[in-house]
Image: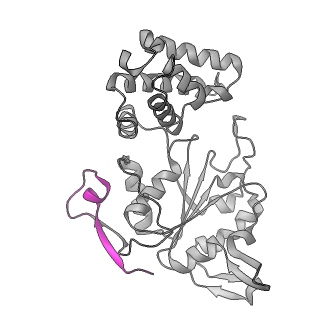
Amino acid sequence: MSTLHPFPVSTTFDVQAPAELEVMGYADASHPQIPRRQSGYVFRHALLRDVLAYLHESGGDGLFLTGPTGAGKTSLITQIAARLNWPVQSVTCHGRLELHALIGQFVLINGSTQFVHGPLSVAAREGHLLILNESDLMDPSELAGLNDIIEGQPLVIAENGAEVIEPHPRFRVFATGNSVGAGDQTGLYQGVLRQNLAFMDRFRVIEVGYPEPALEHAVLQNAVPSLPTEIVSKMLRVANEIRTLFLGAGHEGGELTVTMSTRTLVRWGLLAATFKGAPKVFEYALTQALTARAEPEQREAIHRIGADVFGDYWQVQTHADL
């Protein structure tokens, strides 16, 4: 593994921080498992602080990031890792994923059976970050097998001759989910399971919501610089009205079963730029970005929101009409 290297927080993440404040990463930027750096990514200070604190000292914990779909849970981790040259083993969980797939298994290679280490074993041995995306979709009895390794105890692989992997001091475990291990109370995230309490007790938890308007404005403007500022502002207004109807009020369910995540918002902007010559370009792009998968009455409601917010711009034929 590469030698450690200090990175100034202010210049590494383009945030306001004392010049002397540093975080440790790796010197070698050539490892193939280092995530690709996304130029123009905007870090949220509080979330960046919490993740960096965990990277500095895990204290025998994992870090669980919870929040609505498309809020940027995984990208927060990977973009931090990209700037610290920290390799990542990322797994998207599902209901049929078993623990042995994370640890490793025997496979047939060139006519002989060989044991191939899985992402958990590699991350623990090499000091990588392990990201369990959509972890609350996985069988809780399988995830409970991670309890000891999260706490820093050795990983014993019985299938490979009782091989013992001592976790690297820089090994970290992240999990993301739309719930916090208590199951889905909304009915919107199919397949989410209530998780084992002992497993969840081993995690710090941070909530990742949608960015503040000013920050999300910068995200969209950076992603689609050709969009006029006024149009970006109108897209944000539409997104926030959709989210309000999706989330509902208090304990009442929302009126929509689809939402405008930051990911979907950027997709809308990119499609609007791509199809800039199409009739009613913003409605056309919104259909592909979001509403084609909505129920007809919800699609109509969302398009009414767009028409109300955009006004005359909703009817423009090309960007030249803006």
57 left or right of 96? left
Q: Is residue 6 magenta?
A: yes
Q: Can I make out residue 158 in this image?
A: no
Which quarter of the figure has residue 319? top left
Which quarter of the figure has residue 302? top right
Near-viewer residue (121 or 32)? 32
Near-viewer residue (128 or 20)? 128
Q: Residue at x 51, y 16 (%)?
A: 280
Q: Residue at x 47, y 57 (%)?
A: 77
Q: Is residue 170 above or below residue 186?
A: below
Q: Is residue 288 magenta?
A: no
Q: Can I make out residue 22 in this image?
A: yes
- Furthest toward the left, the residue is 19
Position of the C terminus, as image quadrant, is top left
Position of the N terminus, as image quadrant, is bottom left
Marks counted in the figure total: 0
Find residue 242 and report its horizontal and vertical position in percent. Answer: 55, 24
- Furthest toward the front, the residue is 277
Find residue 244 and report its horizontal and vertical position in percent. Answer: 54, 24
The residues colored magenta run 1-21
Find residue 55 and report its horizontal and vertical position in percent. Answer: 43, 66
